[in-house]
């Protein structure tokens, strides 16, 4: 299993440009997440999905959009990039288990994005 | 609002010098507390889940413990390869099925 994969690893955008960060998981997990990690800060949830066709906002959704057409893929779209979106972006997935109180999330390697 | 505070922010140890990292949390009810390891330029790697006060889990040189207000990650006789940032996160029982609150992490450096 490759687990959670993300592309690209690095990207530099100019202000106002748009791009899509790709995320794929091969663990057949229903839940998927997008986080951003800024220096000295904890991971912040941007968007999440509990299954194909179902997405919802997290703590910091402004400036981002997502879609989930398959179980495996969960792309994150940045429209009109701004310097405040300079960050490291992580995709994660998890699978609820019957009777379990909670379940761990598995993370991809991240995409380092710079907006100048 | 859920809060997670990790201390110290950074810790430097000599190889073989045992120590502990702290994760203090405030939640209305705890479904679970997670520890992750994050190497530079990589994504967080899952280590442990703790569910109830008094619970302990071990993996190699790491042992995680949980009380009603905090968790400790004990590192026994660390090696340089244990150097990483260690993240703590909580899942609130009153919250949704998805939301974790993360601390800012402790950067551990183990010198040979």
Image (spheres, rainbow, N blue to C red):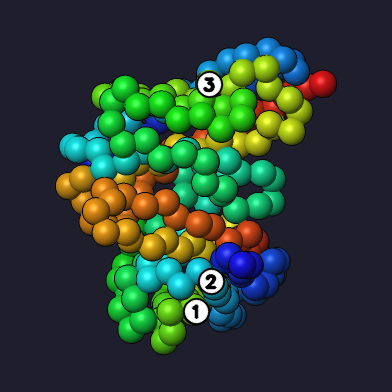
Asked if labels 1 and 3 share a chain, the reply is: no
Left or right of B81 on screen, residue A64:
left
Considering every residue shown, the one lying at the far right of the view is B112
Q: Secondary structure at mark 1?
A: loop
For mark 1, name the chain: A
Element class at badge 2:
strand
Is residue B106 among what the camera can see?
no
Q: Is the C terminus of chain A in the top left, top right, bottom left or bottom right quadrant? A: bottom right
Q: Residue drawn at (68%, 31%), measured in percent from left and top?
A: B82
What's the distance in space between the residues labelled 2 and 1, CA to CA? Answer: 7 Å
Q: Which residue is mark 3?
A: B74
Residue A36, image x, y percentages: 50, 57
Q: Residue at x 19, y 38 (%)?
A: B29
Q: Nearer the viewer, residue A25 or A17?
A: A25
The answer to which of marks 2 and 1 sits earlier in the sequence is: 2
Q: Name the residue tied to disc 1.
A: A73
Q: Using the image, determine if residue A26 lies above or below residue B77.
A: below
Name the mark on residue A19: none
- The answer to whether the residues at label 2 and label 1 have Cβ atoms under 8 Å apart is no
Name the spot of residue B112 as percent of width and height, x first. Answer: 82, 21
Q: Residue at x 50, y 57 (%)?
A: A106
Give the crowd class for mark 3: few <14, some 14-19, many >=20 residues within 10 Å.
some
Instruction: Identify the residue position indicated by label 2 in the image.
Output: A25
Q: Is residue B54 left or right of residue A35?
A: left
> Looking at the image, which residue sits at the far bottom?
A69
Where on the picture, by quarter, is residue B61? Answer: top right
Percent across and percent down for residue A52 are: 36, 81
Foreground disc of the pair 2, 1 = 2
């Amino acid at each position: 299993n490759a687990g959670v994969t993300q592309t690209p690893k690095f990207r530099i955008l100019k202000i106002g440009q748009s791009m899509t960060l790709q995320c794929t998981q091969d663990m057949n997990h229903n839940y998927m997440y997008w986080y951003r990690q800024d220096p000295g800060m904890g991971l912040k949830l941007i968007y999440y999905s509990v299954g194909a066709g179902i997405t919802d906002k997290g703590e910091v959704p402004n400036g981002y959009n997502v879609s989930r057409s398959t179980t495996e893929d969960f792309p994150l779209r940045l429209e009109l990039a701004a310097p405040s979106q300079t960050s490291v972006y992580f995709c994660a997935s998890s699978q609820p288990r019957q009777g379990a109180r909670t379940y761990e999330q598995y993370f991809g390697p991240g995409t380092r994005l710079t907006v100048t | 609002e859920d809060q997670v505070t990790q201390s110290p922010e950074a810790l430097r140890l000599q190889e073989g010098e045992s120590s502990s990292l702290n994760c203090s949390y405030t939640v209305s009810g705890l479904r679970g507390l997670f520890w992750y390891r994050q190497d530079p330029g990589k994504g967080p790697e899952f280590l442990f889940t703790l569910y109830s006060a008094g619970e302990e889990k071990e993996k190699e040189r790491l042992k995680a413990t949980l009380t009603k207000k905090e968790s400790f990650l004990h590192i026994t006789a660390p090696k340089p390869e244990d150097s990483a940032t260690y993240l703590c996160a909580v899942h609130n029982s009153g919250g949704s099925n998805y939301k974790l609150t993360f601390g800012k992490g402790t950067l551990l450096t183990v010198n040979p």
